[in-house]
Amino acid sequence: MTIAALEGEALDLLAGRRLVVLTGAGLSTDSGIPDYRGPGAPARAPMTYQEFVAGPEAQQRYWARSHLGWQRMGRAVPNDGHHALARLDPELLITQNVDGLHEAAGTRSLVALHGRVADVVCLSCRRTSSRGALERELDALNPGWLERHGWVESRPDGDVDLDDTHDFVVPRCPCGGPLKPDVVFFGENVPADRVARCYAAVEALGTDGALLVAGSSLTVMSGLRFVKRAAAGGTPVVVVNRGLTRGDALATYKLEVGCSEFLTALAATAAVSPHLR
């Protein structure tokens, strides 16, 4: 079967069903945010939660690099895929991304599994604050930092490749506690209430709905578990991703096509279907 015919069958299946959508980093590449594991992506070694909480030196290294990475991520705007999903208005959109682009596109029913990098939390008092306010403080405390280091290579989580961070000044919460982006680091657990909401939405689909995966390799269990739950319940699964995923064997259809193009086509198909909101 040709790629076009396979894509047509997948579109026909999805256009007549209620949807839950799971998105990953591959959806945001068209917004200029690099992918973790897509074809040609370099090996990544993001800071773990255990490293971050180990002490001020690790936190200094993280924020020095993240301050540079924010210059790209903080300016990213939703692409055609984000806008198409907002128009589709699925039963629930589950995203593994922390870039906030689904919210910016106007998606209504959303679970950001790993949080949002635009939010900051104090690890002592749990007070949350705006990343924008912290960025202004980082600029004031580290004059010339951006000019000296320029636009070094960015990573999907807003980090960059930079080794020399010894002179970077990191503010603390007014309570004196350390600040962390309000995202789930490697080594942390996704909050149980988020997982429960996602499971409930997937299970409610039954055999009449469908789970659509867009731009995720499903390498980590935080996303793969929903594919497994859908398949176990007889819910069709469509995976749209360039490259292999851990969910390919469970997929009704696996499409090696671009997310933006496929989702735009799906939104156009759904616009003339009385079955899909």
Image (cartoon, rainbow, N blue to C red):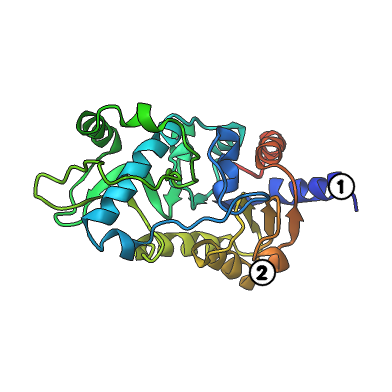
* Relative depth, front residue between 80 and 234: 80
Residue at the image point whose x is 36% and y is 26% from the top: 147
Quarter of the image with the C terminus in it? top right
Tags 1 and 2 touching, CB below 8 Å: no
Q: Secondary structure at mark 2?
A: loop
Tell me which amino acid carries mark 2: Gly
Q: Residues within 10 Å of mark 2 (few under 14, many from 20)?
A: some
Vertical placement of residue 230 versus 239, above or below: below
At label 1, counting other C-alpha atoms closer than 10 Å, the crowd grade (few under 14, some 14-19, many 20 or more) is few
Q: Residue at x 48, y 31 (%)?
A: 76
Q: Position of 45 compared to 57: left or right?
A: right
The type of residue carrying mark 1 is Ala
Instruction: Please identify the quarter of the rendering in which residue 119 is found.
Output: top left
Residue that numbered label 1 is attached to: 5
Numbered label attached to residue 234: 2
Position of 66 with respect to 78 (left or right) is: left
Relative height, residue 256 to residue 75 (above, below): below
Outermost residue toward the left in this view:
175
Which SS class for mark 1?
helix
Is residue 88 at least partly visible in the picture? no
Identify the residue at horizontal 50%, vertical 59% (top origin): 201
- What count of labels does the image hold? 2
